[in-house]
Image (cartoon, rainbow, N blue to C red):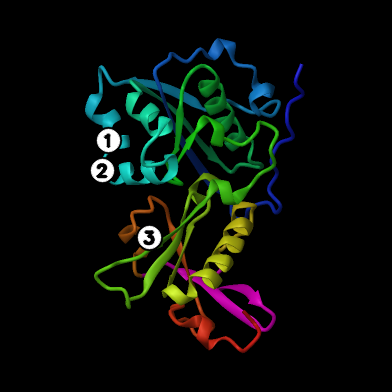
Amino acid sequence: MVPPPAVWPFAAPPVPARRADVVLAVFGRTPLDLAALEPAAVGIPAGVALPEVRTVLRATEPRWLDAWRTGSLRAIAERDLGPEGPDLAALDAADRVHMITASVTAPVDLGYLQAAWGLARHALAQGATTVLDVHAMTYRATAALAAPDAPLDVAREVRRIYETSTTGPDLPHALHTRGLRKFGAPDLIALCGDADVRLVGHALGALADRVARGVSLSLARHPVDVAPGIIWYVLPDEHGLGELLQLGNTARVLVDERGHDLVGVLGRLPRGSA
């Protein structure tokens, strides 16, 4: 018998209490038998409540199901699964989707997230082929899922996206996260230029990891230590950038010490600090 995995804890209890939402869409052509579920074997800790599961057939909702693999989502699927090959073909062949959803108020740990991924593993073991992490906008084929006993990897759970533009290459572009809603936390946005992406992306990723693990951004000006002697700040999203980016989540904005965007920030740092 496989022992149940340890529950993923928060590094710091979130204050104030959070509301977390997880949505996984699992595509395939086979029914889902929940009676055959072995929680520990698929990575569900002992005592964790199972998320809700609802199966939608293409025969009854063809336009709804096809919307998950066409349009802008099609471009994401091709990037994640490959523009050609068996993984994308399996997504196209799916005639049903198992929707796994969990909404948790004031979670004390991340067992609900482990349970959602565990149900996805169970569906894949029964013949499903593809998982879409809806809030992170990330498609994964069966082989790309983490092992049932893998530790929490926030970089797998939260996607970072740099919104470039060919029509305005010199304008500030948004570098942002998707997926922190699964942790009950706001997504993060920074406005920067091409030369700044590596530095700002590193800072954004490190901050996302801390926030996912329980750090609160409730202060109006939340300080972020970027390097020795360099502090940036996280501010409320007063200009509605999160809505413009269609994050489906609240957002916070990362700025420099003067409250300005991060365009050209690499050139403003003291030599040797980046």
Helix, strand or loop at mark 3: helix
Looking at the rendering, the stretch of residues picked out in magenta corresponds to 219-238
Which amino acid, by three-letter code, is at mark 3? Gly
Q: Judge whether residue 264 is colored magenta.
A: no
Which amino acid, by three-letter code, is at mark 2? Gly
Say which of 49 and 100 sits in front: 100
CB contact under 8 Å: marks 2 and 1: yes
Identity of the residue drawn at 69% across and 80% down: 228
The residue tagged 3 is 242
Whether 31 is drawn above or below 154: the answer is above
Helix, strand or loop at mark 2: helix
Q: Is residue 266 left or right of residue 5?
A: left
Query: Circle 1: is it few (<14), some (14-19), or many (20+) Cα within 10 Å?
Result: few
In the rendered structure, find residue 67 and report the number of the disc placed on it: 1
The residue tagged 2 is 71
Percent x, y of residue 256: 51, 80
Task: Report the Cα–Cα distance between label 1 and label 3.
Answer: 22 Å
Say which of 243 and 230 sits in front: 230
Helix, strand or loop at mark 1: helix
Which amino acid, by three-letter code, is at mark 1? Ala
Say which of 187 and 194 sits in front: 194
